[in-house]
């Protein structure tokens, strides 16, 4: 009898333990279920993507209570994925404007880089943009940021693109560099770390385009308007992490370099240093979109709808403005 009683008591004890555990898990479950989640993309293997990489590697999305599924997609694919609903937010170039001109319903919710981050490198003997008259300048693809940069820089120097200077579409950055080195082009638009290879090949810096501060939507945070309407809390958490990453890039070189090394798949300190120095100051502390950076894209867009469009139709600063008003951004830069 004593043995049976002990068995019953032990069984009852286990029931109580399991019931307690189950109740605890039940009460904890909503907390996990309520953690907002987003599917995010970045569209280039470039230092321009640094904030989203640093935010991921420094666990800032987790810190701000966001579950983020992050992946790489090329620019056009990234935009198409957001249009199709398979991605919620992305760090992309001006392709979102082109998509909207074709009927998409996307919106930039934060500025990424509001100016070109490029250099013009040329063959020996090319010492100014004016020297390119009657020659060839290499860019990557039509309507790419390198193409826009070349056309704007040439125009500012009083040269007419496609008339005074031929534009060579090389396809990609390695081919662009080869075109200039081989003499098929007199100069080319490039950024770090390609500039290291250009210098090593004997090419000469002609113009630091970044320092010209030409307004241009180089990179921005893009999202479907549906996500802004229906999932603004998650998007706000994403932006808080993104903004904190910008402050971390300025303050913590080693964390940034480590993230760059992972995503650029290199451990070359020279390459990583060049990329870090190129991009560390170009991300605005308060990433509000401006009409100026969008207008430049609309001015060169081929769609007939561009001329009737207002720059303000393509961005929504409300979430960043709320974050700014909360004092969060000021707090990031008041810390030692």
Image (cartoon, rainbow, N blue to C red):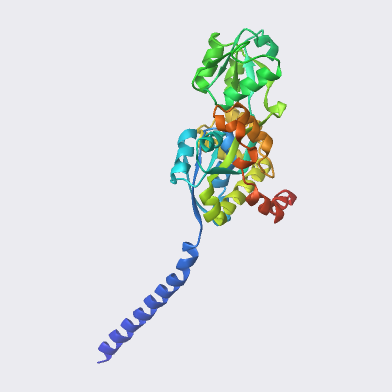
Residue 71, x across and y down, in percent: 46, 42
> Viewer-proximal residue, 144 or 23?
144
Question: Does 190 appear above or below 334?
Answer: above
- The structure residue drawn at horizontal position 49% and vertical position 42%, both measured from the top left corner, is 41
- The structure residue drawn at horizontal position 65% and vertical position 22%, both measured from the top left corner, is 152
Question: Does 200 appear above or below 49?
Answer: above
Q: Along the horizontal axis of the image, is 225 left or right of 326?
A: left
Residue 263, x across and y down, in percent: 51, 37
Residue 318, x across and y down, in percent: 64, 50
* Quadrant of the image containing the N terminus: bottom left
- The structure residue drawn at horizontal position 57% and vertical position 48%, both measured from the top left corner, is 58
Question: Does 149 appear above or below 314?
Answer: above
Numbered disc total: 0
Question: Does 60 appear above or below 259?
Answer: below
Is there any visible trace of residue 308 in the rendered image?
A: yes
> Viewer-proximal residue, 312 or 236?
312
Q: Along the horizontal axis of the image, is 101 left or right of 23?
A: right
Is there any visible trace of residue 231 in the rendered image?
A: no
Residue 210, x across and y down, in percent: 68, 27
> Viewer-proximal residue, 228 or 257?
228
């Amino acid at each position: 009898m004593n043995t049976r009683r002990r068995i019953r008591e032990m069984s009852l004890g286990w029931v109580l333990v399991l019931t307690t555990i189950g109740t605890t898990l039940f009460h904890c479950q909503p907390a996990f279920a309520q953690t907002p989640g987003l599917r995010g993309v970045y569209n280039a293997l470039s230092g321009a993507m640094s904030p989203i990489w640093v935010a991921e590697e420094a666990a800032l999305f987790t810190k701000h209570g966001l579950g983020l599924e992050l992946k790489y997609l090329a620019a056009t694919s990234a935009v198409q994925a957001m249009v199709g609903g398979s991605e919620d937010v992305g760090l992309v170039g001006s392709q979102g404007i082109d998509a909207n001109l074709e009927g998409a319903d996307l919106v930039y919710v934060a500025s990424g880089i509001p100016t070109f981050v490029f250099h013009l490198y040329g063959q020996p003997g090319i010492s100014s943009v004016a020297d390119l008259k009657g020659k060839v300048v290499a860019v990557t693809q039509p309507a790419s940021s390198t193409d826009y940069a070349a056309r704007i820089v040439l125009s500012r120097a009083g040269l007419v693109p496609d008339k005074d200077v031929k534009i060579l579409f090389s396809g990609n950055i390695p081919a662009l560099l080869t075109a200039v080195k081989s003499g098929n082009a007199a100069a080319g638009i490039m950024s770090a770390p390609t500039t290291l290879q250009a210098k090593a090949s004997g090419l000469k810096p002609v113009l630091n385009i970044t320092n010209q501060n030409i307004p241009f939507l180089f990179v921005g945070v893009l999202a479907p308007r549906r996500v802004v309407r229906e999932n603004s809390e998650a998007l706000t958490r994403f932006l808080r992490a993104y903004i904190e990453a910008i402050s971390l890039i300025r303050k913590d070189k080693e964390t940034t370099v480590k993230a760059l090394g992972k995503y650029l798949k290199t451990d070359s300190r020279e390459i990583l240093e060049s990329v870090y120095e190129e991009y560390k100051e170009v991300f605005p502390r308060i990433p509000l979109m401006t009409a100026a950076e969008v207008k430049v894209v609309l001015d060169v867009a081929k769609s007939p709808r561009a001329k009737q469009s207002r720059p303000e139709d393509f961005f929504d600063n409300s979430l960043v403005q709320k974050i700014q008003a909360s004092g969060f951004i000021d707090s990031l830069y008041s810390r030692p």
